């Protein structure tokens, strides 16, 4: 995702000598996490591109089910890992507003206008409380980030988050505003990321663990191939309660923890095989937010214009072509030229909108001296249904 989602830099340089001329400070990024973000966003694009192909191919369905079992959990987990320092400080709140809230408002509006134009439906509603298609993740990230200090305060945050996800799964009347079902359904993965440390990822990257997890990933694909004719991928979407899958609401007491464990296991398999060295696509990891926000236009345009109606697309060669186009397209959307053009709405600075230093203005009639003294006294830190 964007820099605001997952920031990762190496240790800063040592302090320069007292009389040395100050130099611009350079930060180094960990290529492992850049690689993980890039490969995850490629899986997101491929999953969306494969969905229309699942109706006629068991192999594509198996690949689709395998990817959907872990790709968004992996995204949430990585986002949680790099949210551990979020502490409601003014600077971080400002980045949350400019890096999550503003892109959500801009692209939610853009997607609505796009739908009105592409479908010739000028009455299609615009609602910031009803995220369209891929936009739910920004709503979820905003809620997760705001509650991060609470999760870090708890002694056992993961069981609490998993309990909330289970409660959402057995609550058919929870409603769909702000994609609350998905916010809670994927919450445990974000909280798990908050609890992880660098050592956990190091253990995954050992040769022994990687070799042990390889058959697990292959076994998951084989299992997906076996259940492909009858298993509903909706179990992985977390769009609503389990009653939407035709089972008793109480089934969620078992399925939610089971799906969580499956996703964590497959995420571990994925992260174990992410390359650790810098590769040609490592730099694209910093632009995954751009790819995520933009690729939905391409995917939906293909669906609106019935590109998948061409019979050749459903042949093995056509399926490979769709996969290549999805991977190549999302790669292009993460490149530096795209980031340069759209940085004003995806990663704007907006210094003009905030008070300098993030401090609040003193009350009227309060002198500067009194304000400074007071600040130092305490320390604390019937409308159409929208697509999703």
Image (spheres, rainbow, N blue to C red):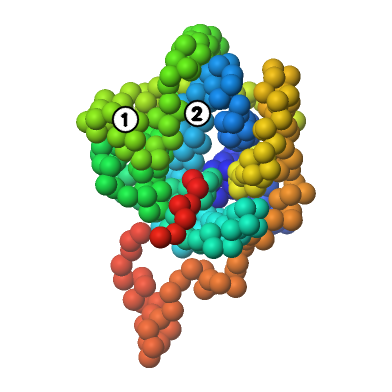
Q: Is residue 225 left or right of residue 246?
A: right
Quadrant that contains the N terminus: top right
Q: Quadrant of residue 56?
A: top right
The number of discs equals 2
Q: Is residue 249 above or below residue 88?
A: above
Label 1 environment density (alpha carbons within 10 Å; few <14, some 14–19, many ≥20)? few
Q: Residue at x 54, y 63 (%)?
A: 123
Please report the residue visible at 65 percent of the width from the left and 47 percent of the height from the top. 297
| Residue that sits furthest to the bottom in the current view | 365
Q: Which residue is mark 2?
A: 68
Q: Residue at x 33, y 61 (%)?
A: 380
Q: Is residue 117 visible?
A: yes
Asked if residue 286 is positioned above or below residue 230 in the image, the reply reads: below
Q: Is residue 235 above or below residue 338?
A: above
Where residue 274 sits in the image (x, y, percent)? Answer: 59, 24
**Dot 1 lies on which element?**
loop
Task: Name the mark on residue 151.
Answer: none
Which of the marked residues, 1 or 2, is nearer the chain's N terminus? 2
Please state which of residues 208 and 294 is positioned toward the viewer in this rendering: 294
Q: Please give left or right for residue 222 compared with residue 279 in the image.
A: left
Residue 333 x, y percent position in the rendering? 71, 43
Estimate the x, y position of residue 270 in percent, counting from the top left.
53, 22
Q: Quadrant of residue 134?
A: top right
Q: Which residue is mark 1?
A: 246
As drawn, the residue found furthest toward the left would be 250
| Residue closest to the eye, 384 or 49 | 384
Q: Can residue 216 be seen?
A: no
SS label for mark 2: helix
| Circle 1 or circle 2, nearest the eye | 1
Q: Residues within 10 Å of mark 2 (few under 14, many from 20)?
A: many
């Amino acid at each position: 995702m964007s820099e605001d989602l997952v920031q990762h830099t190496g240790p800063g340089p040592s302090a320069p000598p007292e009389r040395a001329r100050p130099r611009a400070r350079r930060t180094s990024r960990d290529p492992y996490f850049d690689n993980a973000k890039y490969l995850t966003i490629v899986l997101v694009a491929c999953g969306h591109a494969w969905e229309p192909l699942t109706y006629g191919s068991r192999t594509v369905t198996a690949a689709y089910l395998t990817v959907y079992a872990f790709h968004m959990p992996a995204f949430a987990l990585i986002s949680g890992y790099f949210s551990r320092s979020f502490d409601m400080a003014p600077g971080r709140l400002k980045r949350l507003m400019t890096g999550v809230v503003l892109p959500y408002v801009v692209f939610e509006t853009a997607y609505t206008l796009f739908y009105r134009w592409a479908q010739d439906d000028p009455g299609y509603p615009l609602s910031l409380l009803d995220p369209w298609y891929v936009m739910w993740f920004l709503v979820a990230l905003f809620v997760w980030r705001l509650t991060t200090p609470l999760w870090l305060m708890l002694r056992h945050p993961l069981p609490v988050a998993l309990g909330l996800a289970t409660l959402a799964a057995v609550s058919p009347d929870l409603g769909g505003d702000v994609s609350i079902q998905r916010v809670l359904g994927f919450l445990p993965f974000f909280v798990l990321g908050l609890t992880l440390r660098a050592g956990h990822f190091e253990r995954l990257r050992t040769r022994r663990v990687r070799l042990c997890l390889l058959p697990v990933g292959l076994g998951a694909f084989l299992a997906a191939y076996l259940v492909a004719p009858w298993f509903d991928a909706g179990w992985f979407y977390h769009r609503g309660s389990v009653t939407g899958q035709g089972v008793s609401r109480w089934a969620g007491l078992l399925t939610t923890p089971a799906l969580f464990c499956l996703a964590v296991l497959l995420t571990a398999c994925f992260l174990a095989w992410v390359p650790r060295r810098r590769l040609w696509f490592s730099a694209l990891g910093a632009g995954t937010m751009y790819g995520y926000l933009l690729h939905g236009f391409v995917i939906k345009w293909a669906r609106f214009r019935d590109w998948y109606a061409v019979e050749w697309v459903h042949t093995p060669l056509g399926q490979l072509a769709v996969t290549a186009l999805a991977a190549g397209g999302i790669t292009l959307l993460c490149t530096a030229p795209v980031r340069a053009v759209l940085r004003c709405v995806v990663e704007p600075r907006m210094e003009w909108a905030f008070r300098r230093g993030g401090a609040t203005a003193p009350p009227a009639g309060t002198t500067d001296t009194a304000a400074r003294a007071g600040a130092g006294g305490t320390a604390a830190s019937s409308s159409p249904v929208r697509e999703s």
